[in-house]
Image (tube, grey):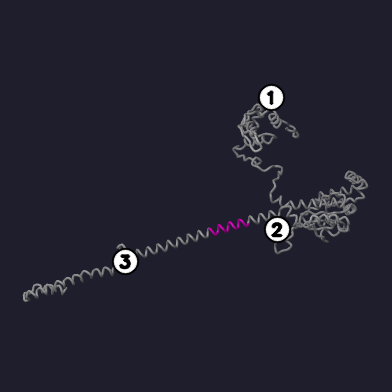
Amino acid sequence: MSAVHRANAWEISDSENDESDDIKASSSSSCVILVQNTSINEPNTSSASARADDGGISADGVQISGRRRRRRREEVLEELETRTAAKERRREEKDKLKQKKLQEQLRRKEAAERLNLLKPENFIKSLTAHIHAVLLQDAGCDVLLRNLDGLQWRNRIENQGLPNSIRWTQQALQQTEDEDKNVIEEDQVLMVISHNELEDMVMSHKTVTNQSALIGDMYEGAESLLDHLYKYLTRTAGKVVTILVMISHQQRSGSWDEDDLDLHLSQHHLDTEELLVHLQLYWNVAVHFLFGWQEVTDHVIALTKALSKRPYKALCGDPDLGFCMDGSWSAGVRVDRDGHGLAQVWTRQIQQLNRVSPAMAKAVTSAYPSPSLLLKAYEELPSEEERRRLLADLTVVGGAKERRVGPDLTVVGGAKERRVGPELAGRVHRLLTSQNPHLLLD
C-alpha cells in the first residue's frame, strides 16, 4: 500500500519536468501493475493453500473435499469386506454341501455293503456250526461232516455246552474290540440222540417225577441227558431246542414206519408220550423222529439255510400278510370320521372278487352306493332268480380294448359298453346273502 501512495504522490508532483514525469509515470504504472499482480496472486495463494488443506481438484476441474474422499475410501473398503464375507459364506456353504453329499454317498455305500452281506448267499458264510464232540462217537456223524465240508460251510468241534447238540454262531457285522461281542449266538439248538437215549430220558423222567410236585420242577439225581437239558434251558433263556431222535437202520428195516412207530408208542410207551407232552408244553422243546444220519444231515442243512435267510427277511420288513402283492391297489383305504372313503371301501370289496375289473366294480357301487342299499333291493324282489340277476343288466363303461395286428404293433380302440352279466351278479349275491362260510363264490 505504501508503494501505491508513493506512486500517487509522484503523479501529482509539479517540481519535476515532463521527461521525469514520463519516466515516473511509466515507473509508477509498472509498479502499480506489479503491486496489482501481487495483490491478485495473494488471495489465490491463500485459497490454494486452503483447498490443499480441505481437498483437491479433480482432472475435470471439479473440487473434491478430503472428507468425501475418505468417505468413499471407507465405503469401498466396507464393500470389499462385504463381498469377501459373502464369498466366504458361499464357499463354506459349498463345502458343507459337498461334505453332506460325500457323507450321503458313504452312507449309501455302507448300506449297500451291509445289504449285500445280509443276503443269504453271503450271510451263510458267516455262520459257524458248533458240533458237540459226543456226536463224533457215532460213525454216522461222518455223513454230516462231509456234507458241511462239501458245501464249504464253517463248522467246529467243541466239548462244551449241551451234550449231543449242534448250535450256530455268526460273526457280527460291526467288529469291536471285545471279541465276545463279535460273535453272536443263534437261538436255535439241535439235540441229536438215539432211540436208546430217548428211552433213558423217559426212565429218568418217570423216576424223578413226583405226582404231588409241580410239573417242570428240577430234581436231583443222576446226570442224565434230561437233567442236562433242563439245566441248559434254565441257564440260557431264549433258546429254542429241538430234539432229533434217530431210528436205527435195523429198526427201519424191521418194518418201522411212522404209523407203526406211533402205534408202538401209544401201546407200549405211554411214558414216552407223557415226556413228549411235558417237553413241548413246559419247555417249548419239539421232538422229531428221523431215520439215520442222512435225514439228520438234511435237517441241519435246511435249518442252516433258514438261519441265513432270517436277517435279510427281517431287514426287508415282510408284511404280516405275505401273500398280498405290492401295489397301490393292495394298500388300505383311509376312512374319515365323516364317512369319506366308505364308497371306495365298498368298491374294493367288489373288486376283490376274481375276474372283476375296476370298471365293473364301479358300475355296481354307482348303482348301489352301499351294501345296505343293495341288500334292501334284494329284499324287495319276490323271487330268488330275480335277486341273482339284479345286477346283470348294469352297464359297464370304461377301459380300452387292445387288438394286436402284428408281432410288435398293437392297436388300441375305444371300449364298447357292456353289461355286468349274470355270472358276476350271482357271485355278488352269494357274497352278501350266503350263510355258509365255506361256500366257494366262483
Residue designated by label 2: 173
The part of the chain drawn in magenta is 94-106
Residue extending furthest top? 382
Looking at the picture, tell me which residue is in the foreground, 2 or 284.
2
Q: Earlier in the sequence, mark 2 or mark 3?
A: 3
Residue extending furthest front? 406
* Residue 177 falls inside the magenta stretch: no
Q: Position of residue 132 (x, y in %)?
A: 83, 58
Query: Compared with residue 441, is residue 174 higher up or lower down, i.e. above or below?
Result: below
Q: Earlier in the sequence, mark 1 or mark 3?
A: 3
Q: Position of residue 383 (x, y in %)?
A: 70, 23
Residue designated by label 1: 386
Residue 56 is tagged as: 3
Mark 1 belongs to which amino acid? Answer: Glu
Q: Quadrant of the C terminus?
A: top right
Which is more foreground, mark 2 or mark 3?
3
Circle count: 3
Q: CA distance from mark 1 to mark 3?
A: 111 Å
What main secondary structure does the magenta stretch of the protein show?
helix
Left or right: residue 393 versus residue 435 is left
Looking at the picture, tell me which residue is in the foreground, 413 or 304.
413
Location of residue 239 (image quadrant): bottom right
Mark 2 belongs to which amino acid? Answer: Leu
Location of residue 364 (image quadrant): top right
